[in-house]
Image (cartoon, helix red, strand yellow):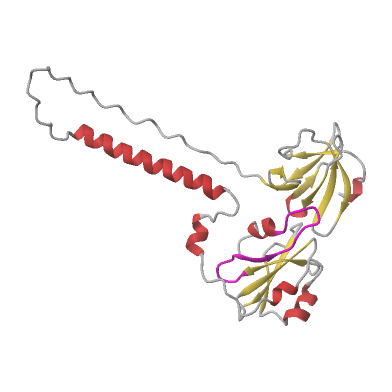
Amino acid sequence: MESFAKRPFSFYPAIRNVEYNEWTYERETWSEVQVANSKTGAEIWIPRLYIGTISSADEPVLIVGLKRELELKGGAVWPYDRQVLNMPAPPREGRKPETPPVDAPEPPPPPPSAESQMGRMIGYTLLLGVAATLLVVLFAFQGVPKPQEWLRKRQTATSDQRYLTLTREDGRHDVARKLGPAGQDQWISPESAEIHFELLWYPDRSYIIVLMGTERNGGRYIGTLHASSREILDSVKLPGGGSTASMLRTLPKF
């Protein structure tokens, strides 16, 4: 993006919660690009992970593609997840019993009919549906574990916490110097990718070191995962606010 300097451009899709979709390039690091809004002057950092292709023509305006729809919250951009809630259908209304005469003796209660039993079953089903919908809403918020994470949750103890000495400036050689040689290294992104991810496995310590960079063998530390549960043990704070935790949650499958 540095190649078009101060030329204005627009993101597609546009970043949510931003009224004016025209930006200019400010500066960049190995993991992020800072842009400024042409109207408000607000500056935000966008991880390279989400930046896609750039249009070859700039008429009527230069377009920078985003790989995911983003939204601005608390001065930082986050992946936007659409939540679709299905409204349950109202229960069927049963027939009202006839009111007996005042002087007539009260008739014995009729045995439950098949229709009333069906109505109760529908009511129970609707209650379960509403409960499931509420759970989906709760799981959509960060900090509340998703069901699949509950199923995968295991003991996340490690033999040491030496990974906490790593910083965002550390590369593969720095990791080896601080932690010793990895038991296995693994690339989880193809060679043609714009962003490369490398995993350094320490199976005897039960954790995985994650490196990210724009070219292979030039990655820098972005966090540590538990080897079996894949839970995040450590992430790196970003200069524009937030951390690399969102990148760690959206790593390619491995």
Left or right of 135 in this view: 205: right
Residue bounds of the magenta highlight:
226-244
* Residue beneath the point at 53% across and 50% down: 139
- Residue, x 78% and y 81% (percent of image)? 177
* Magenta-colored stretch includes residue 235: yes
Q: Is residue 169 above or below residue 99?
A: below
Residue 184 appears in which quarter of the rendering? bottom right
Q: How far across and down, in percent of the image, does residue 34 sit?
A: 84, 49
Rendered view: 230 above or below 57: below
The residue at the point 17 percent across, 33 percent down is: 113
Q: How many marks?
A: 0
Q: Main secondary structure of the magenta part?
A: loop
- Residue at the farthest front position: 103
Image position, residue 1 (x, y; %): 86, 49
Query: Does residue 84 belong to the magenta stretch?
Result: no
Quadrant location, the C terminus: bottom right
Is residue 235 found left or right of 214 in the rendered image? Answer: left
Q: Position of residue 172 (x, y in %)?
A: 77, 74
Q: Is residue 131 left or right of residue 61?
A: left
Where is residue 74 shown, x and y percent of the image? 73, 46
Q: Residue at x 49, y 60 (%)?
A: 150
